[in-house]
Image (cartoon, rainbow, N blue to C red):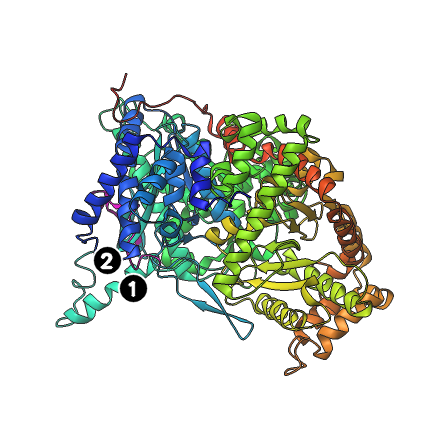
C-alpha cells in the first residue's frame, strides 16, 4: 500500500496554490536568504524559527510593494470614486498565508522553504493573529477588504491600531482568565508607519460664536499616526490599503501648562493621550458608555475625515476651484460606510468641517453629508445600542453636541410638519432621549444622516424596518435596504481547506474562487461516486489533522471517527450555548440509562470568549468545562461522548476547526442573531447545520432547501406570540422529564460536587428570567439532534447532503455582498481589470 503523502507533498499537488516555476523558487530562496542576512542580521547558525518567519514574511512583502505602489498610482491617475469603510474593528487574523494565496506564491514559497530544510506550516504557526476585533462585525470588515480589493474597488479600510487586541483566553480550573494580547511584541512585518501623514485630533475646549463663524478653542490635541497595511486582491495585482491610526502625544504635551519644574510629570503624562489606541474594548453586542471608548470613536473619525478631505482636494479631478471650497462633487468622489454606529460621529464631524472650516452653508453641507454617508446596522439587541450621555459630549466634544442638537431640531421640525400634534412620534424619533440622564441615540443619528441604511440578512433587515426603526421606515422607506453578509472564499475555503478546494477544482475548474455561484455546477454531481468518496475522504483527513492538533496542543485525545459537533462563537445568552449544554447532559443521561444501546459517538466542541465583565457568559464557560469533567471521565460513556472547550477561539483556530466539523450549531433565539457568518463558513466547508430560522440561516435553508439543513424551533412569529402570552419556563420544566433531570443535575451540584451552589445563577436565570427562552426550544432541539444522529449513521446520504450544501453556498460570498453595496449604495461598478504587474509596462 502506498504510504500517505505528507502535508507538504499534498500541498505541492494542489493546482490552485500557484505554479512553482523554477525561476520563482530560486527567486524566493535568494530573497529569503538576503532578508535573513541583511534585514534580520542573522546567520543561518543562530537564526531561530521566528527569524525564519520574518525572513519569509519580508520576502512575500517584497512581492506586494510594487503592486501596492502601482495600484495607488492607478487610482491617482484615474481618480475613481473612493470607498471608505470605517470600522472600530478589523479582525484580520494572520496575513502570511493569505498574501501568498492572493499573490499565487504559495507553491513557490512551499518549495523554496522545503529546499532550505524548513517547514512552511511551522513558520505560518509563528505569526500572531491581528486580533483587532471581537467577532462577527470585525471579521466581516476583514472579509469585505479582501472582496473590495478582489473586485478592483478603490477602497480603504480605516480603523484603530490597538496596541492590545482581543485578550488571550486561558482556562484555569474551568474558568476563563484573560491575558493581554501583546501582538506587536516582536514587530509587525505587514505594516508601514506613515509619520508624514500624521494629523491632529482635538478634544475638550469651548465653543465661541463670532460674526465670522464658529470657533472651537482651547482644545487638547492628540496626534494620529497612520500605519498602512497592504490588502491584496485575488490574483488581480490590485493592492488596497487598510490605514489604522495610533495615538501620539504632541512633543509639547502639557509642557506649556504653567507647571514650572513639572517637566518629568509632563512627559510621563504623555501616556494619557496615547492610551486612546492602547486597547480594544472586549464587548460583543454590548454597549459600555466609557469616556475612553467615546474618545476612540471620535479619534478614528476625526483623523479619517481629514485624510479623506485631503485626498479629495489633492486629487486630479477633485476640484477646479483654486481655494478648494467647492464640495459639490464630494459625494461623487467619496462614499463613507459606517460599520455599525461606532463611527457615527463621522456625520457631525463632516458637518463641522464643511460648515465651520470650509464655510459651506448648512443646508448644502447637510445634503453633501447625507449623500456621502451610509449606515449598516448589526444588531437589534437593546443593550447593544449606543446611547451616550449628553453630559459626556458637552465636556469632550462641545461643538459636536451643538451640531447634533441642530441636526435633531431640523429633523423634528420636518417630522412635526408631516405628523402635526403627534408628540409621541417626536419623542420616539428624536436623537436626544429625555430622562434623568439625557442621552444621544447614535442609531437615530446614523439613520437621519445617511442616504442608505441596511441590515445584514433578509430577516434582520425586515425586523429593522418593522420594529427597531419603524417610524423612520414610514418616513423614508426608500432609504432601507438589505445586504446579506458573506465571507471571502479565499481565506475560508482555499486557504483553510485546500483539500476540499482541490476536489472542487478537479470537478468544475477554479472559476468559483472569484465567482462562488459557480459551485452550483456541483449539483448535477451529487450522486457522483468519486465526488462522494473524495468529499468524505477530505473531511476525514481534516478531522484526523485536527485531532492530532488537539492532542499536541491541549493533551486531549478524541475519537476521530466520532461526529464533530461544533459550536464556536462569542459566549452570549442569546446564542444559547446553554441549549447545547442541556442537549449534552440529555445525551449523557441516555447513555447512562441504557449503556448497551448503540449511540452515534460525538465529540462536542464549544469555544468562544466571554466579555470580561459579563458574569453569566463566564458562568456558561464554567458549566461547559464542568460538564466535560464529568462526561469525559465516566468509564460507562467511553468515547461515545466527549465534551471539549476550545480555548482561545480566534481566527487562526477557526481556520483549523471549521474544515474538520461535521455539525455546525447556529441555535440563537429567532430574531436575535442579525446574520451570523460562521454559519456560512461551516456550510462552505462541508458541515451540516443544526439551526433556528434566524439570521442568514433562513437564506441558507432557502438556497440549499430546508430539508438539507436541520431546522428546528420557534420562528420569529412564535417568539412574538410567546411574548404576548408570557413565557413560563416552569411549564416546560414540569412537562419534560429529561429537561427536569438535566436542570436538577446542574442545580444540585452533580457537575460541581465541590461547590454544589456553583450554578445557581444559571438555573435561576433559566427558570425565572430567561429573555431567550431556552426551555421553549429544548424539546424540538433534542428531537432534531436525534435526526442528525439518524442521518450520520448513513455516511453516503450524509455526504450527499454535504455536497448539496456546498453547491448552494455560492450566495454567501462577500464578493456578492460587496457587489451589491457597490451598485445599490456606493454607486460604483466592480471591475475585473487586471492592473499590469510591476515587472510589465503599464499599458
Spatial CA distance of label 1 from label 2 is 8 Å
Instruction: Name the one closer to the observer, 350 or 156.
Output: 156
Q: Position of residue 22 (x, y in %)?
A: 30, 31
Rendered view: 798 above or below 295 = above
Residue at the image point whose x is 66% and y is 43% from the top: 697
Crowd rating for badge 1 (residues with CA inside 10 Å; few <14, some 14–19, many 20+) = few
Q: Which residue is mark 1?
A: 272
**Circle 1 SS class:** helix
Q: Is residue 67 visible?
A: no
Residue 662 in picture, x, y percent from top left:
64, 49
Quarter the N terminus occupies = top right
Classify mark 2: helix, strand or loop: loop
Q: Is residue 450 left or right of residue 470?
A: left
Q: Choose between 479 and 766: the one closer to the eye.
A: 766
Which image quarter: residue 26?
top left
Relative to 343, is 365 above or below? Answer: above
Q: Is residue 13 above or below residue 139?
A: above
Q: Find disc 2 in the rendering and name its residue.
A: 249
**Count of numbered labels shown in the rendering:** 2
Q: Is residue 216 magenta?
A: no
Residue 17 lies in what quarter of the image? top left
Could you tell me residue 800's position as x and y percent?
A: 70, 37
> Along the line of sight, which residue is nearer the eye, 265 or 624?
624
Dividing the image into 4 quarters, which one contains the C terminus?
top left
Residue 15, how many percent across, how many down? 45, 31
Q: Name which residue lies at 55% across and 42% down.
A: 412
Q: Do the numbered discs 1 and 2 sit on residues whose CB atoms are within 8 Å?
A: yes
Q: Return the residue found at the far front.
A: 1
Q: Which segment is the magenta one?
A: 183-202
Give whichever of discs 1 and 2 has the lower sequence position: 2
Task: Determine crowd level at label 2: few under 14, some 14-19, many 20+ residues with C-alpha closer than 10 A.
Answer: many
Residue found at the far bottom of this picture: 754
Amino acid at each position: 500500500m502506498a504510504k500517505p503523502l505528507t502535508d507538504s507533498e499534498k500541498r505541492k499537488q494542489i493546482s490552485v496554490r500557484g505554479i512553482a516555476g523554477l525561476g520563482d523558487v530560486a527567486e524566493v530562496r535568494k530573497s529569503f536568504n538576503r532578508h535573513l542576512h541583511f534585514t534580520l542580521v542573522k546567520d543561518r547558525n543562530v537564526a531561530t524559527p521566528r527569524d525564519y518567519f520574518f525572513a519569509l514574511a519580508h520576502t512575500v512583502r517584497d512581492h506586494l510593494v510594487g503592486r501596492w505602489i502601482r495600484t495607488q498610482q492607478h487610482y491617482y491617475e484615474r481618480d475613481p470614486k473612493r470607498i471608505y469603510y470605517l470600522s472600530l474593528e478589523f479582525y484580520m487574523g494572520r496575513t502570511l498565508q493569505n498574501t501568498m494565496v492572493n499573490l499565487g506564491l504559495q507553491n513557490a514559497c512551499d518549495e523554496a522553504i522545503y529546499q532550505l530544510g524548513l517547514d512552511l506550516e511551522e513558520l505560518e504557526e509563528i505569526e500572531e493573529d491581528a486580533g483587532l476585533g471581537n467577532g462577527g462585525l470585525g471579521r466581516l470588515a476583514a472579509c469585505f477588504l479582501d472582496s473590495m480589493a478582489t473586485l478592483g474597488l478603490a477602497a480603504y479600510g480605516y480603523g484603530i491600531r490597538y496596541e492590545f487586541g482581543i485578550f488571550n483566553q486561558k482556562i484555569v480550573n474551568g474558568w476563563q482568565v484573560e491575558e493581554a494580547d501583546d501582538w506587536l511584541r516582536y514587530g509587525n512585518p505587514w505594516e508601514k508607519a506613515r509619520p508624514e501623514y500624521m494629523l491632529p485630533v482635538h478634544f475638550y475646549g469651548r465653543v465661541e460664536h463670532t460674526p465670522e463663524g464658529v470657533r472651537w478653542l482651547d482644545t487638547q490635541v492628540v496626534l494620529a499616526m497612520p500605519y498602512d497595511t497592504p490588502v491584496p486582491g485575488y490574483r488581480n495585482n490590485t493592492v488596497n490599503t487598510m490605514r489604522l491610526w495610533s495615538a501620539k502625544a504632541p512633543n509639547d504635551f502639557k509642557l506649556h501648562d504653567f507647571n514650572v519644574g513639572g517637566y518629568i510629570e509632563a512627559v510621563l503624562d504623555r501616556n494619557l493621550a496615547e492610551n486612546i489606541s492602547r486597547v480594544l474594548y472586549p464587548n460583543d453586542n454590548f454597549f459600555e458608555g466609557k469616556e475612553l471608548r467615546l474618545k476612540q470613536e471620535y479619534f478614528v473619525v476625526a483623523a479619517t475625515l481629514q485624510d479623506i478631505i485631503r485626498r479629495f482636494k489633492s486629487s486630479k479631478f477633485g476640484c477646479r476651484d483654486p481655494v478648494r471650497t467647492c464640495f459639490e462633487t464630494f459625494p461623487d468622489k467619496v462614499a463613507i460606510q459606517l460599520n455599525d454606529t461606532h463611527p457615527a460621529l463621522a456625520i457631525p464631524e463632516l458637518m463641522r468641517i464643511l460648515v465651520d472650516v470650509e464655510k459651506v452653508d448648512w443646508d448644502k453641507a447637510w445634503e453633501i453629508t447625507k449623500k456621502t454617508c451610509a449606515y449598516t446596522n448589526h444588531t437589534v439587541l437593546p443593550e447593544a445600542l449606543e446611547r451616550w450621555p449628553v453630559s459626556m459630549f458637552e465636556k469632550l466634544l462641545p461643538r459636536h453636541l451643538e451640531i447634533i442638537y441642530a441636526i435633531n431640531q431640523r429633523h423634528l421640525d420636518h417630522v412635526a410638519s408631516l405628523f402635526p400634534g403627534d408628540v409621541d412620534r417626536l419623542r420616539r424619533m428624536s436623537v436626544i432621549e429625555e430622562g434623568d440622564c439625557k442621552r444621544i441615540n447614535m442609531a437615530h443619528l446614523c439613520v437621519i444622516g445617511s442616504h442608505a441604511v441596511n441590515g445584514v440578512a433578509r430577516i434582520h433587515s425586515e425586523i429593522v424596518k418593522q420594529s427597531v426603526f419603524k417610524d423612520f421606515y414610514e418616513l423614508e422607506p426608500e432609504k432601507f435596504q438589505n445586504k446579506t453578509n458573506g465571507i471571502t472564499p479565499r481565506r475560508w475555503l482555499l486557504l483553510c481547506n485546500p483539500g476540499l478546494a482541490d476536489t472542487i477544482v478537479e470537478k468544475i475548474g477554479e472559476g468559483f474562487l472569484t465567482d462562488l455561484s459557480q459551485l452550483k455546477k456541483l449539483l448535477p454531481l451529487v450522486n457522483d461516486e468519486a465526488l462522494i468518496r473524495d468529499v468524505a475522504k477530505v473531511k476525514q483527513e481534516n478531522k484526523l489533522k485536527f485531532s492530532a492538533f488537539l492532542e499536541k496542543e491541549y493533551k486531549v485525545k478524541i475519537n476521530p471517527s466520532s461526529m464533530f459537533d461544533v459550536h464556536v462563537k462569542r459566549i452570549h445568552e442569546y446564542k444559547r450555548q446553554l441549549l447545547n449544554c442541556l442537549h449534552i447532559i440529555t445525551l449523557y443521561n441516555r447513555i447512562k440509562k441504557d449503556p448497551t444501546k448503540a449511540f452515534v459517538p460525538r465529540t462536542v466542541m464549544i469555544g468562544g470568549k466571554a466579555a470580561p465583565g459579563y458574569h453569566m457568559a463566564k458562568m456558561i464557560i464554567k458549566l461547559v468545562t464542568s460538564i466535560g469533567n464529568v462526561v469525559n471521565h465516566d468509564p460507562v460513556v467511553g468515547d461515545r461522548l466527549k465534551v471539549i472547550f476550545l480555548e482561545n477561539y480566534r481566527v487562526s483556530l477557526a481556520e483549523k476547526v471549521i474544515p474538520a466539523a461535521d455539525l455546525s450549531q447556529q441555535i440563537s433565539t429567532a430574531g436575535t442573531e442579525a446574520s451570523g457568518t460562521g454559519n456560512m463558513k461551516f456550510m462552505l466547508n462541508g458541515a451540516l447545520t443544526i439551526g433556528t430560522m434566524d439570521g442568514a440561516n433562513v437564506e441558507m435553508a432557502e438556497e440549499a432547501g430546508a430539508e438539507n439543513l436541520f431546522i428546528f424551533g420557534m420562528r420569529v412569529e412564535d417568539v412574538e406570540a410567546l411574548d404576548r402570552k408570557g413565557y413560563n419556563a416552569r411549564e416546560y420544566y414540569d412537562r419534560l422529564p429529561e429537561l427536569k433531570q438535566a436542570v436538577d443535575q446542574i442545580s444540585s451540584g452533580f457537575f460541581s460536587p465541590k461547590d454544589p451552589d456553583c450554578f445557581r445563577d444559571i438555573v435561576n436565570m433559566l427558570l425565572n428570567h430567561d429573555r431567550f427562552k431556552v426551555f421553549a426550544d429544548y424539546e424540538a432541539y433534542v428531537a432534531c439532534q436525534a435526526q442528525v444522529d439518524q442521518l450520520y449513521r448513513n455516511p453516503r446520504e450524509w455526504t450527499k447532503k454535504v455536497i448539496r450544501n456546498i453547491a448552494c453556498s455560492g450566495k454567501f460570498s462577500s464578493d456578492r455582498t460587496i457587489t451589491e453595496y457597490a451598485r445599490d449604495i456606493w454607486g460604483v461598478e466592480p471591475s475585473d481589470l487586471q492592473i499590469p504587474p510591476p515587472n510589465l509596462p503599464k499599458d
